[in-house]
């Protein structure tokens, strides 16, 4: 034991990461909640990036976080259906279950086991600062589940049980990833080890925060009561086109440069969506459409969105016809995942001082 390990509670000031993750296998982990319905925000902020990060540079692990989903009430039959539909969404978006490890969280028990350890590392004050908890709990803080409060410790465990070095997410998850880094730093510090990596958030691309089509100040979300506020990955071509046609904008034409969109959040959102779908920068989109009205831009965006998203919804529907295959993919994913997670949990227990079983 080191001196600092003697009284870790005294360690209130968390030091910034000083060490690169050079000793760790480059590994990507990310997750999505199977709480019903994938949106264009999930696609551009997460799924599309997940598919792009597959390849030689990283081992990739992607997860349906069913244990996170039940932090708010889920009807059991819906949860099962939504988990399978999300798996179909991952595959239809280009995630190859051979190349990546594709799992649902509850089939890999080490996530929840490490989360308990992290519940004992993370501090109440850190959790109380989480804006997502404040947003979700609202005025109801006494009545929400304890799981909703502890949610970020499970998220840290999801990532660190793989020693993941990179986590692609949308902008809204940034604070949770900072907490993940704090948990890793504090664990390493308290136990005097160099065991967990200091994970890098990957928040990149033109659409890291896709906004509602009805209100440019609100995030596009599956929980928005208005279906017109979002594009769902299961929407057909007509619905996509109609939602884009009716999206809120302003009467001005598109400006010459991006600066001209600074106070026009709805217009900026549509430009970002176009850029992300077309794999262009927002600057290039504005340069191409400068001076044109939204009457011309919206149909072009609708065509592009339909061309990119329709094949995904068609493929999701096809995959959902073979649930047995989806279940097989998830079982196989869990088996592969546990080859990574079981030794990391075993070592964690050892560091913490748990007596191991005799084998
Ligand atoms: P979730 O299920 O809310 O969202 C999944 C992913 O989609 C991104 N996203 C968006 N990106 C851009 N614009 C939007 N409007 C938008 N809406 C959603 C999210 O940023 C996220 O990347 N806590 C996580 C799930 C999670 C996780 C993890 C993620 C659990 N464990 C470990 C990474 C690593 C969540 O609730 O995401």
Image: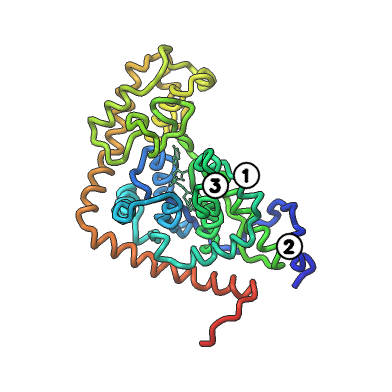
Q: Which mark is residue 8?
A: 2
Label 3 CB, ligand 1: below 8 Å? Answer: no
Q: CA distance from mark 3 to mark 1?
A: 16 Å
Question: At x 49% / y 72%, what residue is drawn?
Answer: 342
Q: Give the color scheme: rainbow, by chain, secondary structure or one colour.
A: rainbow
Give the residue at the far front of this rendering. Answer: 142
Q: Callout 2: 10 Å neighbours few (<14), some, many (20+)?
A: some
Which residue is under mark 3? 142
**Quarter holding residue 290:** top left
142 left or right, relative to 38: right
Q: In terms of secondary structure, where does tag 2 sit?
A: helix
Q: Position of residue 237 (x, y in %)?
A: 24, 33
Q: CA distance from mark 2 to mark 1?
A: 21 Å
The answer to whether residue 17 is above or below residue 258 is below
176 left or right, relative to 278: right
Q: Which mark is residue 129?
A: 1
118 left or right, relative to 99: right
Q: In terms of secondary structure, where does tag 1 sit?
A: loop
Give the residue at the far right of this rendering. Answer: 3
């Amino acid at each position: 034991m080191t001196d600092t390990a003697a009284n870790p509670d005294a360690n209130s000031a968390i030091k910034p990461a000083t060490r690169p993750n050079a000793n760790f296998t480059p590994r990507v982990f990310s997750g999505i909640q199977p709480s019903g319905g994938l949106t264009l925000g999930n696609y551009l902020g997460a799924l599309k990036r997940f598919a792009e990060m597959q390849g030689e540079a990283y081992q990739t692990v992607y997860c349906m976080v069913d244990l996170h989903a039940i932090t708010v009430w889920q009807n059991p039959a819906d949860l099962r259906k939504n988990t399978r539909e999300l798996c179909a969404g991952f595959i239809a978006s280009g995630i190859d279950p051979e190349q990546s490890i594709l799992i649902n969280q509850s089939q890999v028990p080490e996530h929840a086991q490490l989360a308990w350890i992290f519940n004992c590392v993370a501090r109440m004050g850190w959790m109380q600062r989480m804006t997502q908890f404040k947003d979700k709990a609202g005025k109801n803080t006494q009545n929400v589940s304890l799981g909703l409060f502890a949610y970020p410790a499970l998220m840290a465990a999801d990532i660190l049980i793989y020693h993941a070095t990179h986590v692609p997410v949308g902008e809204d998850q940034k604070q949770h990833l900072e907490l993940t880094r704090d948990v890793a730093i504090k664990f390493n510090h308290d136990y005097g080890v160099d065991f967990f990596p200091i994970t890098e958030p990957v928040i990149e691309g033109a659409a890291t925060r896709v906004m509602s089509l009805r209100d440019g100040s609100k995030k596009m979300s599956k929980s928005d009561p208005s279906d017109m506020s979002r594009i769902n990955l299961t929407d057909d071509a007509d619905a996509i086109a109609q939602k884009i046609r009716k999206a809120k904008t302003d009467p001005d034409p598109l400006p010459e440069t991006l600066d001209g969109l600074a106070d026009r959040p709805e217009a900026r959102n549509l430009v970002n969506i176009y850029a992300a779908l077309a794999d262009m920068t927002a600057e290039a989109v504005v340069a191409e459409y400068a001076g044109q009205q939204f009457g011309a831009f919206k149909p072009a965006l609708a065509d592009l969105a339909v061309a990119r998203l329709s094949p995904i919804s068609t493929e999701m529907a096809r995959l959902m016809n073979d649930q047995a295959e989806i279940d097989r993919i998830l079982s196989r994913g869990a088996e592969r995942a546990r080859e990574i997670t079981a030794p990391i949990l075993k070592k964690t227990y050892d560091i913490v001082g748990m007596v191991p079983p005799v084998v």
